[in-house]
């Protein structure tokens, strides 16, 4: 664990939220998904979200990006209430980057073509775009596959590509939806290191949801556990696994972190 996350950032970051969800409730018809949820994603902090299927983790990402609107409550980005802001404005003005669980790239375009397609939207100057793309290719060690179609890349290379696409717009916050799903152990470790390095080098706010609890806890500063439409526990990884509510609703008695 120490090789991935050598320290955890907590209290002093809490005064600098990039994303704030305040008293959020969400229902689809008669089915309630979230009930009075409040939490922040702070600058320079990695926050994890854990919970069983259907508990509302992906819905929270959809609320932040503007894909859905809350039934009640408010969403604030950099201190501005954005409930009525469209997706593109949240992306461009408030620098929200989303990394979906599946896809997020053009399958039949090469890696470099993918980056150029999104770069032309995000970056006005051709020179700046090319410079940024080359920087990202170098940073993620993708030069050897720059001319390979995305559908032929390995799982880890695809994840790196999608992260690179999200970074083209210099986001302030990254939302990662199940980034460790269907990856081998070595690729997960590589991706954990990428995420922690992004925190350290770019001072991003990062929010990760995943079912791979150990892999998520290995690289976050704090995490929340969702159950029955509510946040039932929040804390550092060690605090969470010793929390009776979290163990009862999610981890179980046999879960070991280290």
Image (cartoon, rainbow, N blue to C red):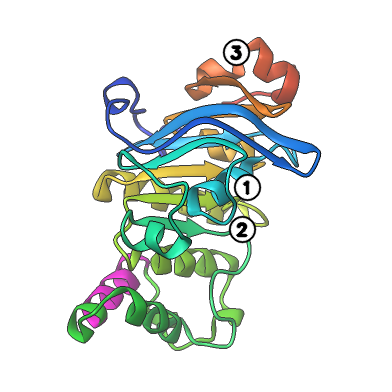
Q: Residues within 10 Å of mark 1 (few under 14, many from 20)?
A: many
Q: Which residue is mark 3?
A: 242
Q: State the image coordinates of residue 251 (x, y, percent, origin top left).
A: 70, 25
Residue 59's place in the image compared with 182, above or below, is above
Q: State the image coordinates of residue 197 (x, y, percent, origin top left).
A: 33, 48
Q: Is residue 219 visible?
A: no
Q: Is residue 185 visible?
A: yes
The quadrant where residue 114 appears: bottom left
Q: Nearer the viewer, mark 2 or mark 1?
A: 1
Q: Nearer the viewer, mark 1 or mark 3?
A: 1
Q: Between residues 101 and 87, which one lies in front from this camera angle?
A: 87
What's the CA distance linking mark 2 and mark 1? 10 Å
Confirm or deny contact between disc 2 and disc 1 (CB under 8 A).
yes
Q: State the image coordinates of residue 231 (x, y, percent, origin top left).
A: 60, 24
Q: Earlier in the sequence, mark 1 or mark 3?
A: 1
Q: Which residue is mark 1?
A: 58
Task: Describe the element under mark 2 as helix, strand or loop.
Answer: loop
Rendered residue at 51%/24% (across/down): 237
Task: Describe the element under mark 1 as helix, strand or loop.
Answer: helix
Q: Earlier in the sequence, mark 2 or mark 1?
A: 1
Q: Which residue is mark 2?
A: 101
Rendered residue at 74%/35% (across/down): 32
Q: Residue furthest right?
A: 30
What's the CA distance linking mark 2 and mark 3? 29 Å
Residue 231's place in the image compared with 43, above or below, is above
User: Magenta segment, which residues?
Assistant: 130-140
């Amino acid at each position: 664990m120490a090789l991935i996350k050598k320290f955890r950032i907590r209290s002093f970051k809490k005064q600098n939220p990039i994303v704030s969800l305040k008293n959020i409730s969400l229902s689809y018809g008669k089915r309630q998904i979230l009930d009075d949820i409040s939490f922040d994603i702070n600058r320079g902090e990695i926050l994890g979200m854990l919970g069983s299927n259907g508990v509302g983790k992906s819905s929270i990402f959809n609320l932040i990006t503007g894909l859905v609107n809350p039934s009640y409550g408010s969403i604030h980005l950099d201190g501005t209430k954005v409930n009525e802001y469209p997706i593109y404005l949240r992306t461009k003005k408030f620098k929200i980057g989303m990394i979906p669980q599946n896809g997020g790239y053009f399958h039949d375009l090469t890696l470099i073509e993918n980056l150029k397609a999104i770069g032309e939207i995000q970056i006005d100057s051709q020179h700046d775009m090319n410079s940024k793309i080359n920087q990202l290719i170098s940073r993620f060690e993708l030069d050897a596959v720059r001319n390979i179609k995305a559908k032929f890349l390995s799982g880890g290379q695809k994840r790196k590509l999608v992260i690179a696409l999200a970074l083209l717009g210099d986001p302030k916050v990254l939302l990662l939806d199940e980034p460790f799903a269907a990856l081998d152990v070595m690729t997960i470790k590589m991706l954990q290191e990428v995420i922690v390095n992004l925190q350290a080098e770019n001072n991003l706010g990062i929010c990760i949801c995943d079912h791979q609890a150990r892999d998520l806890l290995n690289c976050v500063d704090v995490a929340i556990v969702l159950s029955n439409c509510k946040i039932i526990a929040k804390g550092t990884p060690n605090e969470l696994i010793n929390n009776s509510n979290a163990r009862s609703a999610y981890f179980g008695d046999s879960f070991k972190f280290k």
